[in-house]
Image (spheres, rainbow, N blue to C red):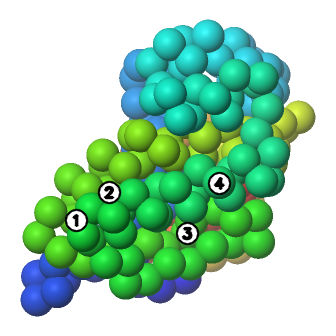
Amino acid sequence: MPNATNTRDPRLGVTWLLAAALVLAACTPARPTPAEGQTFGEQWLARLPTILQTTSEFQREILRDGEVTPAEHERARLAFIGCIEDAGAPVTDLHLDENGQITLLGVGGEEADAIVQRCEAEYYSDVREAWRVALRRDDTEQAMFARIAECMAQGGYVVSATPANFGQMVSEAEAIGPGARKRLLECADEAQ
């Protein structure tokens, strides 16, 4: 994985978006605490009515039936990238994983951060979350935490395999040091 610690190149005005979105999403207190043992699919479906009320019309159309197909995910991802480019911000780097998820996005220009945030909110944020759920629909948060802890151990870092939440894993990794935090982001991305 490319170096995730350099988040801004001041010469080019390039913004790098990585698995940090996962960290932010997992640490957001606005989400209800999932019931222990509840699958990702069950958690997401419980939140779907609220998501449908707050998301954009574009994303609502895709999410209305409670499922996201590969074609729908690709449509949303392409609309997100198209929105960025239509706003005059060149996409300088784009990497996708084997499931079509964005793992690295470079966007140039003065207003790159604001453009990316606006376009993501309009075309991609909720569909991206639903796609991640679709990929691990029958999985549980506890199983994901165990995979992340195992990945961390393979890199020589020890974090709890049964944390209260992802934020606890982030805190544990930060206490170890910047290398552990970077590895945690990589492991969280792989666990998806």
- Residue of label 4: 75
Q: Label 2 near label 1: C-beta < 8 Å?
A: yes
- Quarter-wise, where is residue 50 in the image? top right
Q: Quadrant of the N terminus?
A: bottom right
Mark 3 or mark 4, whichever is nearer to me: 4
Q: Label 1 near label 3: C-beta < 8 Å?
A: no
- Residue of label 1: 112
- Residue of label 3: 103
- Quarter-wise, where is residue 63 in the image? top right
- Visible residue check, residue 189: no
Q: Say few, some or many: other residues with alpha carbon within 10 Å of mark 2 (under 14 / 14 to 19 / 20 or more).
A: many
Residue drawn at x 67%, y 34% is 62
- Residue of label 2: 116
Looking at the image, is mark 3 or mark 4 earlier in the sequence?
4
Looking at the image, is mark 1 or mark 4 earlier in the sequence?
4
Q: Secondary structure at mark 4?
A: helix
Q: Label 4 near label 1: C-beta < 8 Å?
A: no
Q: CA distance from mark 1 to mark 4?
A: 22 Å
Looking at the image, is mark 2 or mark 3 earlier in the sequence?
3
Q: Secondary structure at mark 3?
A: strand
Residue drawn at x 77%, y 53% is 71
**Residue situated furthest front in the rendering:** 86
Residue type at mark 4 is: Arg
Q: Quadrant of the C terminus?
A: bottom right
Q: Say few, some or many: other residues with alpha carbon within 10 Å of mark 3 (under 14 / 14 to 19 / 20 or more).
A: some
Above or below residue 190? Residue 54 is above
